Image (tube, coloured by chain):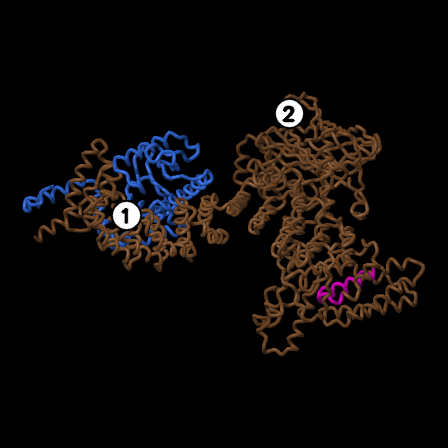
Chain colours: A brown, B blue
């Protein structure tokens, strides 16, 4: 007997497991059926064993054979045996086999009832889980009836893993045993609000399946689903609910709305994902998305807003913002309105105002936004106004005019200002009016507006700005008045200051008080001098002299740290943790401390506390001279300033906030449209139309005139302060200067930038990053009319094709006439040809694909094929164009010469000294040399000059001797050995192309003879 | 509701079959053959769903499939719904398929056909955590993987797996017949009662 057991276990050791079976089948491809039948015999043998492990293994193999199409129902009883094993691994095998081959007519199923019940109530959740999974496949009406109660209990199991399985299987139970539905339904409904999302989605799943079969019983659940729909983030659940509503809508038409609505939501959600990868395809649906802004559902509108942010372009910005402005007007609910406001500003200011073509329009939008009641984002608007006014110089005059109007009508804004924070814009308005007061039309009036008694109701930091800027204004006013013969006017102005300032001197806000009293004393002193008829304006103005320029966020880094200064060392003993936090400057604007923020300082007495707070405030307050450049960083400040120190006088004005004199931004939209239409029309008909505009006259008197023909294309230039200075050497500029008829003018040399092969496809970058080639070009021009025209050249050799050179020409119209129908033509030589499109003749010119309004520049590229690069060449060319004036148009011609030097075909190529030595040893190179006399510069300057102008790189340098290397676009090696002694420089050169070398050396000589 | 999930290779050899509705074995094999026939003649760049075959419910059913390297994953789904519903369904099933395949990939570390061939049982256990009784059970892959890991037999990979590994090493020595014959030969003489079935 013992032996039998031993034999059993040894033999078992070599039983086939599933892997062996599979391997065996694969090894017996030719007699698979036979092999399998022996395997089945083995399995039958194994199933007779008492060892449950052996049985489980056998059943596992049967499951595999079942997949191959073998009937294994004969082993059903064994399967049940394995199912009832106490070991999870075996039990699982049993249940798997059962779920694969049991069905309603399998008679052993009724034997399983108790076993399954036992497993369902097992303390091990995975026993329960595996039983539920198995049951879901072979549940019969009998099983369903007998186990319904057990499963229902499991729906409230502590483990979500079991709950979700129990919920799902309920559907199967309902199908087999419909009577269970009624008692189970309340609990199922409960599960819709289960804390676990998996259980929730299972419940949704089951109810959806049920509702598909019999929708009308589930109508009552619609509100619950609606709630789920709006709160759920699980897209699977959302889709299920939509489907459910799809089933319900025939019964309840009202649901169509909500259904459509979720689809919309999902659609927008999907679009925002697509937008990241395929912005173009989403942009074409702009109208659709704009429509979604009209949706009743706030979450859909917010989604649509998110999408719009990514969709704007220069073309559609005005249109989109116009639409958004309409929504702002009719929006209900502050949250949504505030969201709209921030989005408008975000959209406009993104990427350094990249999409704004007209800043007057933007200022108008900002001014219109100030009319919003109850917004929290006064700060945001204010910071935008400041940012634009400071960085866009051309807009200052306009901005100042607008801000003056704002100040004048401040009472309209400040209705509920203490609460709504919109008065922050007055901060910006006052500062802009003060700082750029030279643009004010009527500074006296603005000064008066800034000193009105009502100003005292504004928050402290705004008053402080008022006082300070009133002083600036005062200086400006004085200056204008002192020129007059009548000196009383100036004295009256001083008197006005002296009359009004005491109001601020009494302010409880220390900042205001201090500034006011200081300025008051100053004005009194000025008045004294005035009474003695002393000219004082100049000196007063000196107080505020100096132009404000934007500073890059990292500008500080460029300032070298003085020697011996350790910035990390403590100057004093490190303060306690809490204090150091206080000192962190948080914002551009001065911010008063939030009231609740200092509970820690309880040990400090109240007075001390107040003193510190004020001191801090003074420190931070109001330093408008430091402006951060990045607009995104300005979103941070949203806390409303604490106002505890200010006596609050509520002035409730319920008049509609239509500030007189403020421009409607709409008119810009119209202008823009008109302009574009006109441009289109012009292109089509080439009709003659006047288009002359004086740029200088723009912007100032905007409200007054129907200057609708204004040409908006050249956006006011934004000063974009980037971290890096632009590469100075990447482009040289060539000017066409108006000259007398026969006069000729040699012009400066030019840079050519070949495209390096690695950077193919990104020409522009390549051009900027690696200027490698240079050619001197001479331009001679003949011009007889008053137009000024300027051109910038940039030539790029195409490395991939050793015979191509790309010439980029930037045309700039410096005159004030409109230039159109430009044609660029070059007289081909045998060696160099301008590439023309297929089908055009060898002498046809190339149309420049744009027109030039006055002051505008644009770039065009022309490709030349060059056969031999060993000789320098000059190409003659002509530019013809039509000059359009107000009442006439003339055809003009401009001759020029393109000079392709040999150095322009060289590319700076680094070379290692060993490679260099090998190259020289090879003996393929022919030598030549040149001597330069009277070169009076340090050796490293000399080398730098050769590198820079002639595209060489230094291989090695030893004392006053250096080897240099370069390569032509056609692969010629050029090696130089440069030696210097005194003022004589000798260059020994080697190259595999002597002619090229000779020319390069000539050009080098030329470079040094010029200096 | 999902009616069946089939995985077969480029030659139509089943690698996993899971019917959520009962069919006899020969019928199951017919369905596999028919489905393979339908799916395999389609180009890889045409759409990935088609009307069900005649055997498994006809036009009420959609076959939604994907072809990964040597394997076809086919979900057979009933679709007695509106057009929109069908689109959703396809979408859902696709994502489900994706979840399933990704989970396989995670559990088997770069799953390939051989993994499925030799570990059909494990594939079933993974599938059980994704779909239960034809309904979507879980779509969060991390959750699925976690549950599969927890339920792995403790022996696997641990110390107790050592004997099993030793045995399989012996089995893999490619001379399976020799030790077996010797053993059985010896003992059969003494214990004749253990004759083969």
Mark 2 / mark 1, whichever is N-terminal: 1
Q: Is residue A130 left or right of residue A244?
A: left
In this picture, is A428 found above or below A899? below
Let me know if residue A218 is in the magenta part: no
Q: Is the magenta stretch mostly helix, strand or loop?
A: helix
Q: Name the residue under label 2.
A: A837
Q: Is residue A116 left or right of residue A225?
A: left
Could you say where residue A853 lies in the image, as x and y percent from the top left?
75, 37
The chain letter for the residue carrying disc 2 is A
Q: Is residue B170 visible?
A: no
Q: Nearer the viewer, residue B178 or A107?
A: A107
Q: Which of A491 and A678 is in front in this view?
A: A678
Q: In this view, does A80 lie to the left or right of A624?
A: left
> Magenta stretch?
A455-475
Residue drawn at 67 percent across, 36 percent down: A794
The quarter of the picture where residue A516 lies is bottom right
Residue drawn at 22 percent across, 44 percent down: A106
Q: Mark 1 points at which residue?
A: A141
């Amino acid at each position: 007997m013992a032996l039998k057991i031993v034999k059993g276990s040894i033999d078992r050791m070599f039983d086939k497991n599933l892997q062996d079976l599979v391997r065996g089948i694969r090894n017996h491809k030719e007699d698979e059926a036979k092999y399998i039948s022996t395997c089945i015999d083995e399995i039958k043998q194994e199933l007779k064993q008492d060892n449950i492990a052996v049985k489980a293994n056998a059943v596992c193999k049967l499951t595999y054979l079942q997949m191959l199409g073998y009937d294994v129902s004969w082993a059903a009883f064994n399967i049940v045996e394995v199912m009832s094993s106490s070991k999870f691994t075996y039990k699982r095998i049993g249940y798997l086999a059962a779920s694969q081959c049991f069905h309603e007519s399998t008679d052993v199923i009724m034997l399983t009832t108790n076993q399954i019940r036992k497993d369902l109530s097992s303390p091990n959740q995975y026993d329960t889980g595996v039983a539920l999974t198995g049951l879901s496949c072979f549940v019969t009406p009998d099983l369903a009836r007998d186990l319904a109660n057990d499963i229902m209990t499991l729906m409230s199991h502590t483990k979500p893993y079991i709950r979700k399985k129990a919920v799902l299987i309920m559907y199967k139970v309902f199908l087999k045993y419909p009577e269970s539905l009624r008692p189970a339904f309340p609990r199922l409904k409960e599960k819709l609000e289960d804390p676990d999302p998996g259980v929730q989605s299972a419940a949704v799943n089951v109810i959806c399946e049920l509702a598909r079969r019999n929708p009308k019983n589930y109508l009552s659940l619609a509100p619950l689903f609606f709630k789920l729909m709006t709160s759920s983030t699980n897209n699977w659940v959302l889709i299920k609910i939509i489907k459910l509503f799809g089933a319900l809508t025939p019964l309840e038409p009202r649901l169509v709305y909500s259904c459509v609505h979720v689809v919309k939501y999902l659609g927008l959600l999907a679009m925002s994902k697509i937008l990241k990868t395929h912005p173009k395809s989403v942009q074409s649906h702009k109208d659709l998305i704009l429509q979604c802004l009209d949706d009743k559902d706030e979450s859909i509108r917010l989604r649509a807003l998110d999408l719009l942010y990514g969709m704007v372009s220069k073309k559609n910005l005005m249109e989109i913002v116009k639409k958004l402005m309409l929504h702002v007007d009719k929006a209900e609910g502050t949250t949504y309105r505030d969201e709209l406001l921030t989005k408008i500003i975000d959209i406009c200011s993104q990427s350094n105002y990249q999409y704004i073509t007209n800043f007057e329009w933007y200022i108008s939008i900002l001014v219109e936004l100030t009319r919003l009641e109850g917004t929290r984002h006064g700060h945001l608007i204010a910071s935008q106004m400041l940012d634009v006014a400071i960085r866009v110089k051309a807009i200052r005059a306009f901005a100042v005019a607008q801000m003056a109007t704002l100040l004048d009508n401040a009472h309209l804004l400040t209705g509920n200002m203490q609460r709504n924070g919109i008065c922050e814009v007055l901060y910006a308005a006052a500062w802009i009016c003060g700082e750029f007061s030279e643009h004010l039309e009527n500074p006296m009036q603005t000064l008066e507006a800034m000193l009105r008694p009502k100003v005292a109701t504004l928050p402290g930091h705004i008053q402080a700005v008022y006082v300070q800027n009133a002083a600036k204004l005062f200086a400006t006013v004085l200056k204008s008045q002192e020129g007059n013969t009548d000196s009383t006017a100036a004295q009256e102005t001083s008197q006005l200051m002296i009359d009004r300032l005491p109001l601020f001197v009494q302010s409880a806000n220390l900042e205001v008080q201090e500034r006011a009293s200081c300025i008051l004393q100053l004005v009194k002193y000025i008045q004294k001098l005035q009474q003695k008829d002393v000219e004082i304006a100049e000196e007063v103005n000196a107080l505020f002299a100096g132009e404000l320029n934007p500073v890059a966020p990292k500008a500080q880094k460029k300032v070298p740290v003085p020697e011996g200064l350790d910035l990390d060392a403590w100057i004093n003993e490190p303060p306690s943790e809490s204090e150091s936090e206080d000192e962190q400057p948080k914002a551009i604007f001065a911010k008063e401390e939030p009231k609740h923020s200092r509970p820690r300082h309880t040990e400090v007495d109240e007075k001390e506390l107040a003193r510190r707070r004020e001191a801090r405030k003074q420190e931070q307050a109001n330093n408008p001279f430091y402006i951060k450049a990045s607009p995104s960083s300005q979103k941070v400040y949203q806390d409303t300033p604490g106002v505890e120190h200010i006596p609050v006088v509520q002035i409730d004005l319920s008049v509609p906030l239509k500030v007189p004199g403020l421009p409607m931004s709409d008119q810009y939209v119209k202008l823009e449209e008109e302009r574009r239409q006109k441009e289109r029309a012009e292109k089509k008909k080439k009709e003659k139309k006047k288009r002359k505009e004086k740029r200088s006259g723009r912007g100032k008197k905007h409200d007054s005139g129907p200057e609708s023909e204004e040409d908006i294309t050249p956006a006011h230039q934004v000063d974009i302060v980037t971290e890096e200075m632009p590469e100075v050497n990447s482009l040289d500029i060539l000017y066409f200067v108006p000259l007398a008829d026969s006069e000729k003018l040699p012009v400066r040399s030019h840079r050519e930038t070949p495209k390096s092969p690695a950077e193919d496809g990104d020409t522009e970058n390549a051009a900027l990053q690696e200027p490698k080639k240079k050619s001197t070009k001479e331009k001679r021009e003949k011009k007889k009319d008053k137009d000024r025209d300027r051109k910038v050249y940039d030539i790029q050799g195409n490395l991939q094709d050793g015979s191509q050179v790309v010439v980029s020409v930037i045309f700039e119209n410096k005159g004030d006439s409109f230039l159109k129908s430009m044609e660029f033509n070059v007289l081909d030589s045998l060696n160099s040809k301008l590439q023309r499109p297929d089908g055009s003749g060898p002498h046809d010119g190339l149309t420049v694909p744009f027109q030039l309004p006055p002051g505008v520049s644009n770039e065009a590229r022309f490709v030349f094929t060059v056969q031999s690069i060993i000789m320098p060449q000059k190409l003659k060319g002509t530019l013809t164009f039509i000059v359009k004036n107000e009442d006439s148009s003339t055809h003009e011609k401009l001759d020029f010469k393109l000079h392709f030097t040999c150095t322009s075909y060289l590319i700076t190529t680094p070379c290692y000294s060993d490679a260099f030595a090998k190259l020289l040893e090879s003996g393929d190179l022919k030598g030549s040399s040149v001597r330069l006399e009277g070169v009076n510069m340090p050796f490293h300057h000399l080398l730098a000059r050769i590198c820079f102008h002639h595209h060489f790189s230094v291989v090695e340098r030893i004392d006053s001797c250096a080897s240099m290397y370069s390569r032509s676009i056609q692969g010629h090696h050029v090696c130089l050995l440069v030696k210097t002694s005194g003022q004589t420089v000798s260059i020994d050169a080697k190259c595999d192309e002597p002619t090229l070398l000779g020319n390069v050396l000539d050009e080098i000589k030329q470079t040094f003879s010029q200096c | 509701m999902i009616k069946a999930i089939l995985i077969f290779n480029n030659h139509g050899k089943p690698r996993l079959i899971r019917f959520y509705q009962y069919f006899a074995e020969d019928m199951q094999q017919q369905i596999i053959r028919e489905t393979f026939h339908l799916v395999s003649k389609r180009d890889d760049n045409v759409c990935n769903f088609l009307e069900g075959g005649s055997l498994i419910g006809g036009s009420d059913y959609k076959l939604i499939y994907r072809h990964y390297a040597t394997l076809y994953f086919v979900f057979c789904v009933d679709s007695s719904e509106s057009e929109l519903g069908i689109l959703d369904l396809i979408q859902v099933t696709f994502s489900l398929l994706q979840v399933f395949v990704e989970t396989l990939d995670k559990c088997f570390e770069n799953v390939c056909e051989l993994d499925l061939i030799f570990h059909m049982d494990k594939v079933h256990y993974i599938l059980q955590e994704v779909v239960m009784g034809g309904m979507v059970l879980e779509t969060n892959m991390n959750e699925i993987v976690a549950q599969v890991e927890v339920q792995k037999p403790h022996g696997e990979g641990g110390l107790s797996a050592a004997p099993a590994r030793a045995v399989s090493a012996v089995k893999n020595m490619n001379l399976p017949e020799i030790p077996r014959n010797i053993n059985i030969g010896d003992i059969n003489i003494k214990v004749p009662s253990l004759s083969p079935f």
